[in-house]
Image (spheres, rainbow, N blue to C red):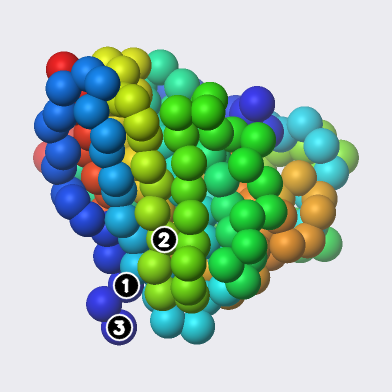
Amino acid sequence: DAGVIQSPRHEVTEMGQEVTLRCKPISGHDYLFWYRQTMMRGLELLIYFNNNVPIDDSGMPEDRFSAKMPNASFSTLKIQPSEPRDSAVYFCASSSMGGAGEQFFGPGTRLTVL
Amino acid sequence: SQQGEEDPQALSIQEGENATMNCSYKTSINNLQWYRQNSGRGLVHLILIRSNEREKHSGRLRVTLDTSKKSSSLLITASRAADTASYFCATDAGQAGTALIFGKGTTLSVSS
């Protein structure tokens, strides 16, 4: 199994540009989570899906952030327009049991907004 | 908001010593999990302990859970340089099917 796949691994962009992060969960997992990690705030849950349906997006910082899961094998997190304070490592994780079980994390996307 | 809070924030030990990290949380839980993160990598699951369990072992790892005190500890015995990483506790806030809430982690440095 390839595990959770994220792309790109690194993204450098300029303020105001649109950024799209991608995630392929582990096949058969019906929960998908997007997290953001910074030194200041630690690991924050942004949004999670169950069976492709967004369940809780209360962690999405503002309307500039949006996430979709068009099918069971693909999800995107979009930031438009990006700002320097969005610089962070963004992780995608998948699970077969939500909070009741183990989450499998991708390698993360390191985003730098100049 | 953070559900779990790890203590200490940073820990430095010598190879062969034991490392103990603590986690406190605020609400009732169904389970508590510990994860490790090596520098520049994603988190890796280490161990899960359910609310009706008091202690669990996995190799050199020992986890305890005290639901009355809303706290857990992770003990790594006979530490190795490869154990150098950040360690996070995560809880489910007592609701099945919901997301985990992670603490800010303990950074462990093991020197040889």
SS state under label 3: loop
State which mark lies toward you, 1 or 2.
2
- Circles 3 and 1: CB distance less than 8 Å? yes
Label 3: chain?
A: A
How busy is the neighbourhood of tag 2: few (under 14 within 10 Å), some, or many (20 plus)?
many
Q: What residue lies at 84% left-to-right and 44% top-to-bottom?
A: B28
Q: Disc 1 residue type?
A: Gly
Q: Disc 3 residue type?
A: Asp
Q: Are marks 1 and 2 on the same chain?
A: yes
State which mark lies toward you, 2 or 3.
2
Q: Mark 1 highlights which residue?
A: A3
Q: Which of the labelled discs sits on residue A1, or is there none?
A: 3
Q: Answer left or right for A61 relative to A24.
A: right
The C terminus of chain B lies in which quarter of the figure?
top left
Q: What residue lies at 40% left-to-right and 17% top-to-bottom?
A: A40
Q: Mark 2 highlights which residue?
A: A75
